[in-house]
Image (cartoon, helix red, strand yellow):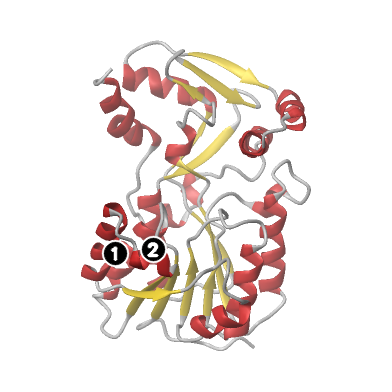
Amino acid sequence: MTAQFPTATQSILVLGAGELGLPVLRNLARLAKQRPGSKVSVLLRQATLDSQEPGKKKEMDELRALGVALVAGDLVKDSIDNLAAVFARFDTVIGCAGMVAGRETPMKLARAALQSGVKRYFPWQFGVDFEAIGRGSPQDLFDAQLDVRELLRAQDRTEWVIISTGMFTSFLFEPVFGVVDLEMDRVNALGSLDTCVTLTTPDDIGKLTAEIVFFEPRFRNEILYLAGDTLAYGEVASLLERVLKRPFETDVWPVADLLEEMAKETDEHAKHIKKYRAVFAQGRGVAWPKEATFNARQGIAVTSAEQWTRGHLAEEQRHY
């Protein structure tokens, strides 16, 4: 039987302080102050801790001011044994380093977490519903995430929590993704105009993750879903027309065409983006009803796609 651990005070280690790590750290630090005895730390490379680059120095100063302890470590170069020795000093470890470190890193970190005996582990799975998508999808990185889930489920010493968030809201509007073309006033629908996508901002994910970490009764061995918004690509075009006050046309990129483009692509970075397009076009495991999410059940306000667009794209358009 899995041991029961109190949630009242926790010693928490966050892996990484990037686009998601920083919002998670800010919100954990805020909630930790309300729970005397709780401590928040972040694991960063020594080079980051020593950096004289103004942006990095500002982030380190902010984290120190929040009371976050800075711990040196390298998720790529350090051995599983070394990482496990660091993780063992904490009750909860939260992976926020993404998959930029490569396909093998999620499994390496999961093995280190289990070896450390840490009470609870949140793997880097802030994204789609990998099980609904299944193995052998166009994005082969997803199979590595399923391997991690199998490893965690096969043991009962370390509790785990997986948080599914859908796509980061901003990514839908990134020119490199190709769905929203502001220059041509066009939305390129992945799969069909009715295919849906769930979007959540990193700030909201940070706020909700912190709530989940400290939530009572404690979450253990389960998958939680978040959503800032869930909408179809056809609705994205309507949203842009409302916010930017100009017409947008739509085009559909069928799944078969996207798979063919992906297969032909020789540039690795471009191929990576095309893998994501094909997965999202298939529409499986990439969207869920907002009503069923943790934030909806708890009545926690989040940023809708329209709110995000008004705060970002509408402002940018004024400067053209």
Please say whether residue 38 is visible from this viewpoint: yes
Q: Nearer the viewer, residue 235 or 178?
A: 178
| Screen quadrant of the N terminus | bottom right
Q: For the residue marked with disc 2, what is the amino acid?
A: Thr
**Residue at image mark 2:** 48
Q: Nearer the viewer, residue 87 or 310?
A: 87
Q: Is residue 57 above or below residue 89?
A: above
Counting from the top left corner in percent of width and height, residue 139 is at 69, 44
Q: Is residue 191 above or below residue 304?
A: above
Q: For the residue marked with disc 1, what is the amino acid?
A: Met
| Screen quadrant of the C terminus | top left
Q: Which labelled disc corresponds to residue 233? A: none
Q: Quote the CA–CA distance across marks 1 and 2.
A: 9 Å
* Residue drawn at the location 40% of the way across and 10% of the way down: 247
Counting from the top left corner in percent of width and height, residue 10 is at 38, 81
Counting from the top left corner in percent of width and height, residue 78 is at 57, 74
Left or right of residue 8: residue 132? right
Q: Is residue 134 above or below residue 77?
A: above
**Residue at image mark 1:** 60
Counting from the top left corner in percent of width and height, residue 195 is at 61, 30
Q: Secondary structure at mark 2?
A: helix
* Residue drawn at the location 56% of the way across and 53% of the way down: 100
Q: Nearer the viewer, residue 296 or 239?
A: 239
Residue 223: quadrant of the picture: bottom right
| Count of all numbered marks drawn on residues in the image | 2
Please say whether residue 215 is visible from this viewpoint: no
User: Crowdedness of circle 1 by 10 Å Cα count: few (<14), some, many (20+)?
Assistant: many
